[in-house]
Image (spheres, helix red, strand yellow):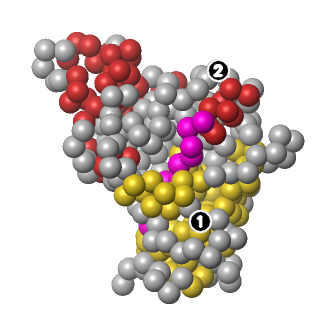
Amino acid sequence: MKTQTRRNFLAGAVGLLGLGGVAAWLGRNDILRWALRRTSNDGLALSPAPALADDTCVLTSSQVEGPFFIAAPIRADIREDRQGKEMILRIKLLRMPECLPLEGAVVELWHCDAEGTYSGYPEDISHDPWKTLRLIGIHGDPVAPLNEKRFLRGAQVADAGGEVEFRTIFPGWYEPRAPHIHFKVLIDAQEQLTSQFYFEPEFCNRIYRQGPAYRAYGECPYTPRNDVAISGQLQAQGLLLTPSWTDDLPLTASARVGIRKSA
């Protein structure tokens, strides 16, 4: 599939079906899933996010915002009533190329729950790609929230060391995306970076097999290698999270996020 822009979020997948002779098939989720999963992100440059304990500094790649962003309240614990494998995520913001902490920057974080649902949007679309397509359109443009729920959304202000910490759950998956966590960074109310963290597929599926909150939908058929959103931005440097797992404790993950501040 050719490299796509943000406005071609799902257009390439629909193109695989063709908009002419098979238009009537678009309501058949099995056909739509087949098309979506055929995405091939050849040339994907996905590299690990340096952990907080590392000395490495990288310029973190941007990724699409996606259709489900809603400005978040300031809070560290974003779980509300959501069930799932608890996770503590620490992020250190660094100004590039100097690799200096960015005090006072705001980090917004949002992701789906264990069943693939985003707060603010219908619960019945997560595993129904046709309903998702009808809601967001083939370009994946932002969609205004449709209800008042705001679970798994939050914002934090970086401390003197450029660090923020969120208490959340490991995200589930939904059609047609690999598991991911959205984030954006703002300085003086100006957006500096919008991106997404990803995970190793086997790590995700281990959670989906074992976690009661995730079992309804099982293993995820999408990975960064066939994710239609990533296909538009194949540079994904510093975006692969590697959480630490202890059965009776929350997952822990951290990332050093390098930002080149705009003028």
Between residues 18 and 75, which one lies in front from this camera angle?
18
Left or right: residue 118 versus residue 31 is right
* Callout 2 secondary element: loop
Q: Which residue does the image show at 69% across and 34% down from the upper left? A: 207
Image coordinates for residue 98, horizontal then vertical, percent: 50, 87
Q: Amino acid at mark 2?
A: Ala
Q: Residues within 10 Å of mark 1 (few under 14, many from 20)?
A: many
- Residue range (magenta): 193-202
Residue 149 in the image: above or below residue 74: above
Q: Which residue is mark 1?
A: 50
Q: Residue furthest left?
A: 20
Q: Which residue does the image show at 39% across and 36% down from the upper left? A: 226
Q: Amino acid at mark 1?
A: Pro
Of helix, strand and loop, which mostly describes the magenta segment? strand
Between residues 56 and 196, which one lies in front from this camera angle?
56
- Closer to us: mark 2 or mark 1? 1
Residue 75 visible, this orientation: no
